[in-house]
């Protein structure tokens, strides 16, 4: 059976690319996994560009294994169904054995597992093989929710429907493109610098403000592992830096309410400097998720009550 896609916005950031050392890209098990603009392989180290891509085009992520005939069959089926959508969806294939951090962060319990990414926010779709008509229904629902969240881009294909072509998206402003390229390369400090310059030129550039918050989040998590962050926080519940790291991790993994609750619960116990630090971090995380998101509205209201 398929899982319902959670309601509400998908905006957010998931930092998975920085958690492991570079690895060799997985080998294709069939023609469906050959890289192009619509269907492509990724892994722990190469996931940051996939997250960025999901800000404009919904990404279907399938976690599979070469030893599983069911996995290989599903990858082939998904590739055909995604291509039939004429660029309105793209498919990223992740070989589970080569991407342990993605398996953990996406909470994969078995292969194959299919997850959606919209605006960097993951949502579970289904496990195991599904009939084509069921997958099509899931894709319809995914596209509807993506549209509600402003993710309506299209990756073009040529007349045969198989080869990549130029993106249908309008070019990004130069500084935004510079930031995008830096994030794709894992240079989050450079991305943040580009976004800060864009904001200095136009303080009303909301996309740059949100991009800066996301680049800062990715930078803070870079080089840290899930186990390291959670172990440190559990061992030192009064360590503000450790709790801030867990909040970043929770939000990056889509556990938005948990991230906000952790910091808001901690807030009354802190001194003035600690409260200022938490307030600044929350405001930044609000930008990552989206200031009009209901979860942000509720957390902002609670923060205001704590302040006044």
Image (spheres, rainbow, N blue to C red):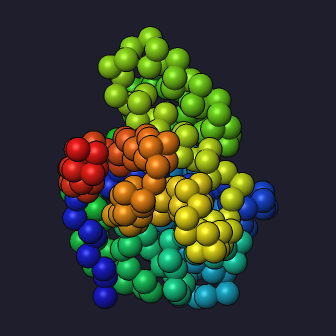
Query: Which residue is the extreme one toward the top?
Result: 201
- Measured from the top left, where is residue 131 in percent x and y? 33, 83
Picture quadrant where residue 125 is located: bottom left
Quarter placement of the C terminus: top left
Seen from the viewer's position, the closer of residues 101 and 110 is 101
The residue that appears at 78% across and 59% down in the rendered structure is 21
The residue that appears at 69% across and 78% down in the rendered structure is 97
Q: State whether residue 67 is above or below residue 220.
A: below
- Measured from the top left, where is residue 300 in percent x and y? 26, 48
Q: Is residue 72 visible?
A: yes
Quarter placement of the N terminus: bottom left
Seen from the viewer's position, the closer of residues 175 and 161 is 175
Q: Is residue 43 visible?
A: no
Q: How many marks?
A: 0
Q: State whether residue 15 is above or below residue 176.
A: below
Q: Is residue 210 left or right of residue 218?
A: left
Seen from the viewer's position, the closer of residues 155 and 220 is 220
The residue that appears at 71% across and 72% down in the rendered structure is 98
Q: Is residue 110 left or right of residue 272?
A: right
Q: State whether residue 109 is above or below residue 56.
A: below
Seen from the viewer's position, the closer of residues 279 and 246 is 279
Q: State whether residue 185 is above or below residue 2.
A: above
The residue that appears at 65% across and 29% down in the rendered structure is 190
Q: Is residue 296 left or right of residue 116?
A: left
- Measured from the top left, where is residue 85 in percent x and y? 34, 56
């Amino acid at each position: 059976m398929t899982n319902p896609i959670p309601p509400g916005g998908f905006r957010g950031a998931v930092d998975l690319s920085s958690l492991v050392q570079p690895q060799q890209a997985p080998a294709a098990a069939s023609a469906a996994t050959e890289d192009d603009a619509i269907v492509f392989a990724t892994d722990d180290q190469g996931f940051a560009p996939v997250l960025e891509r999901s800000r404009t085009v919904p990404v279907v992520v399938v976690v599979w294994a070469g030893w599983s005939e069911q996995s290989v069959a599903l990858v082939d089926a998904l590739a055909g169904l995604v291509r039939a959508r004429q660029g309105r969806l793209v498919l990223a294939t992740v070989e589970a054995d080569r991407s342990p951090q993605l398996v953990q962060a996406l909470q994969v319990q078995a292969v194959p597992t299919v997850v959606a990414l919209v605006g960097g926010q993951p949502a579970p779709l289904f496990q195991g093989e599904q009939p084509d008509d069921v997958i099509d229904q899931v894709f319809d629902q995914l596209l509807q929710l993506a549209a509600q969240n402003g993710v309506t881009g299209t990756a073009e294909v040529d007349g045969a429907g198989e080869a990549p072509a130029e993106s249908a998206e309008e070019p990004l402003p130069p500084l935004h493109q510079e930031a995008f390229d830096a994030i794709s390369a894992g240079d989050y400090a450079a991305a943040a610098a580009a976004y800060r310059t864009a904001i200095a030129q136009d303080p009303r550039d909301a996309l740059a403000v949100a991009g800066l918050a996301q680049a800062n989040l990715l930078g803070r998590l870079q080089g840290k592992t899930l186990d390291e962050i959670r172990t440190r926080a559990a061992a030192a519940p009064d360590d503000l830096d450790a709790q801030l790291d867990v909040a970043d991790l929770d939000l990056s993994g889509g556990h938005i309410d948990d991230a906000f609750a952790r910091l808001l619960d901690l807030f009354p116990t802190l001194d003035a400097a600690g409260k200022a630090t938490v307030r600044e971090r929350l405001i930044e995380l609000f930008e990552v998720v989206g200031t009009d998101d209901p979860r942000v509205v509720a957390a902002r209201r609670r923060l205001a009550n704590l302040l006044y």
